[in-house]
Amino acid sequence: MGHVGSYVWELRQQVGSRELLLPGAQVVVLGPDETVLFQRRTDSGVWEFPAGACEPGQSFATAAVAELFEETGIRADATDLTAFASLSEPQLHQLQYPNGDKVHAFALCFALKRWTGTITPEESEVSHIAFFPLAAPPETLHPPTREVIRLYLRYRPSGAFQAR
């Protein structure tokens, strides 16, 4: 589907580029040999995890599953998601997109080990998708994604939920 027609798109028709407070989700898709899935945005060229805003009627988990499928073609069950962190600090997750739209995102971050499907980028939002070692993410990383990596690395040894 992409962005056009979404709840956020509908809001933008009313408020323009004004800052919106948006709940959403990010998914760290775990691959083989300590790799994770990254996608490159078409609008800014930065690499990030599959992520997106909640639509009306969605929970964080169902938004994560829907965004993951929409952006990557990966199918997952919400029960296979493990929430490991939240990211909401304004200095870390207040964003301005290349078109001028502003958001303060409140994201629940999930890890996903079990998934199916053929990885296919959604062309209007994603230019490339690839697995990279967690210790060596792609260059031009989206700053909130760098923070989510740090949160995940702190979560793994302890299993303690991380908040930032």
Image (spheres, grey):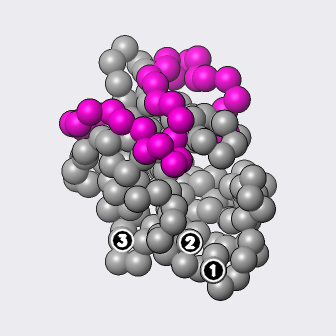
Name above or below for residue 127 compared with residue 20. Answer: above
| Residue drawn 43% across the image and 45% down it | 122
| Residue drawn 53% across the image and 35% down it | 127
Spot occupied by residue 94 in the image (x, y as percentages of width and height): 73, 59
Residue extending furthest toward the top? 33
Spot occupied by residue 144 in the image (x, y as percentages of width and height): 65, 45
At numbered mark 1, what does the secondary structure look like: helix, strand or loop?
helix
Q: Which residue is mark 3?
A: 58
Number of marks in the rendered image: 3
At numbered mark 2, what does the secondary structure look like: helix, strand or loop?
helix
The answer to whether mark 1 and mark 3 are in CB contact below 8 A is no
The answer to whether mark 3 and mark 2 are in CB contact below 8 A is no
On residue 13, which mark appears? Answer: 1
Q: Amino acid at mark 2?
A: Trp
How many residues crowd mark 3 within 10 Å: few (<14), some (14–19), many (20+)? few
| Residue drawn 23% across the image and 36% down it | 117
Does the magenta portion include 15? no
Q: Is residue 162 visible?
A: yes
Q: Is residue 34 left or right of residue 45?
A: left
Q: Amino acid at mark 1?
A: Gln
Spot occupied by residue 156 in the image (x, y as percentages of width and height): 44, 32
Q: Amino acid at mark 3?
A: Gln
- Which comes before the other along the chain, label 1 or label 3? 1
On residue 143, which mark appears? Answer: none
Using the rendered view, name the quadrant where residue 118 is placed: top left
- Which comes before the other along the chain, label 3 or label 2? 2
Using the rendered view, name the quadrant where residue 56 is placed: bottom left
Instruction: Give the mark toward the camera: 3 or 2.
Output: 2
